[in-house]
Image: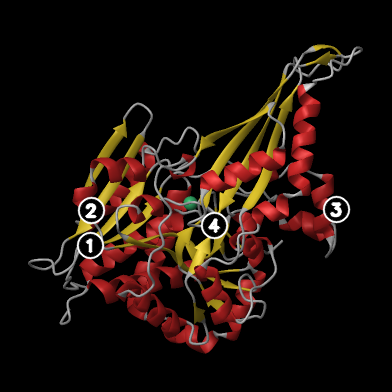
Amino acid sequence: MRVFGLALVALGLMLPTVASAKSPEWDTALDQAVGYLQQYLRIDTSNPPGDVTKAAAFLTGILRKAGINHEVFIADEAAGKVNVLARLPAKGKARAKPILLLNHMDVVPVEMERWQPRDPPAFLRKQEGGSGTESWKSRSRDFSGQDPFGGEIVDDAIWGRGALDMKHMGIAGLMTLIRLKQDGVKLSRDVLWLAVCDEEIGGTMGAKWMAEHHYALMDPEFVIDEGGSGSRGLLSPDARTVFAPSVSEKQVVWLKLVARGTGGHGSMPTGDNPVEILQQALARLMARRAELEEAGDHPIVSEMRAKLGALADNRYTNAITKNTITLTSFQAGVGTPPKVNVIPSEAAATLDCRLLPGGSVPDFLARLKQVLGDERVSVEVTYQPAEPTVEATSDTALFRAIEEVVKQFYPQAVVVPSLLPGGTDSRFFRAKGAIAYGFEPLILAPEDLDLIHGHNERIDVEQFRLMVRMLYEIVTRVARTPSG
Ligand SMILES: [Zn+2]
């Protein structure tokens, strides 16, 4: 399966543009960037446990070699929760607050056995004829799968957990600092690069901790983080290339529902069986879910519709056009496995709810309880970020720089501010007043989204190389002095 096929074909159509983006002075730096990403992917930073000590040592090694000022901040030494802040200072007195390139070192765990098997050796392929791959796959598991921590290049892509989320941006940001220094670009503001731990589990020891304890050291005007990217067929229903920096994200509200009743022998129904109470309440919720999810277009989404004419119809656009309520677990029963003849006295379920920015959580909860319609079902909020969801304006020098650089590399592309369905560390910076955009300058096909937190995560080598160049161009535009 070549997931990047679509992106590559489309890229091929744009060859004149891309060809002009090639420049000899970049070749060495881009080869170096690819090598760094491969090495970085070989460091297992799965979270949990999320120990990033080795990753931080690897990254500080690169910074040291490049002569770039940096500091390691230890949030919890025993658990390996550390953060790295690097800084390229402005020339003379800074004329503006810094731009910060934010990235997280941790990754989500992998299901090793579900990664795509490696290609069979050539001799076996020959034996089985041209179409032998399938029978090889079904016949033999002797050949191990792609190593999620191998950092190998296979089929023109760099494979590994974190290739798209988000070690690619970590290295791209690092290369930006290295090149700015090598090129002697005179900066009007500090350029910061912050690698954090724990993004995948809420940022407590990572971005949140840095914002709470060391914000004065950073205090950026602009932040570039993960989130929006370029795509085809994801946001726009036609084949246009759309680059969509995310300027806000949905509000996370995680709920635990618990029903209590009378336990007893399964042969004698008690009349208030909590499993049935909860199941019936959830059935009422599912039947009326659409009315709870309906919230009208957020202004960001209205702007997207206006700029693109219409939105594509898929689960991504579905998620950004309304509130969503997802039933993610249901637990009941006594014993493991649960006894079939025992009525438990409690049953529980979890709901992952995501509200559009600005939506009132108390109002939403009140309506949800009303729809559940049973006092015996309690609703507890188990997680809700303390930070309010803030929308970053797109009327900034950084947004204009993104537009200009996208046009330089992809003249036909449309740039539109977007809303992100998931949560990122950007919220800690937006809450402090920074303008944070989620923006990864690469093109993803809709199916590529399945690789993020999924199996076979990988990044197309050419896309990665272009991305490094684009990020450098964007940062240079907002950080160099007029004469720089
Ligand atoms: Zn991420």
Q: Quick check: 81 left or right of 221?
A: right
Residue 154 - label: none
User: Alpha carbon of mark 2 to alpha carbon of mark 4: how far?
Assistant: 29 Å
Q: Residue 10 vs residue 32: left or right?
A: right
Residue at disc 4, CB closer than 8 Å to ligand 1: no
In 3D space, how far apart are the residues under numbered discs 3 and 4 (Cα atoms)?
Answer: 48 Å
Q: Report x, y in % for residue 255.
A: 59, 37
Mark 2 lies on residue:
218
Residue located beneath label 3 in the image: 135
SS at badge 2? helix
Mark 3 or mark 4, which has the lower sequence index? Answer: 3
Q: Nearer the viewer, residue 445 or 396?
A: 396
Q: Position of residue 313 (x, y in %)?
A: 70, 69
Res 470 → quadrant: bottom left
Measure the C-alpha gap from mark 1 to mark 3: 56 Å
- Of the residues under marks 2 and 4, which one precedes in the sequence? 2
Between 130 and 278, the residue placed more toward the observer is 278
Q: Mark 1 = which residue?
A: 98
Nearer to us of marks 2 and 4 is: 4
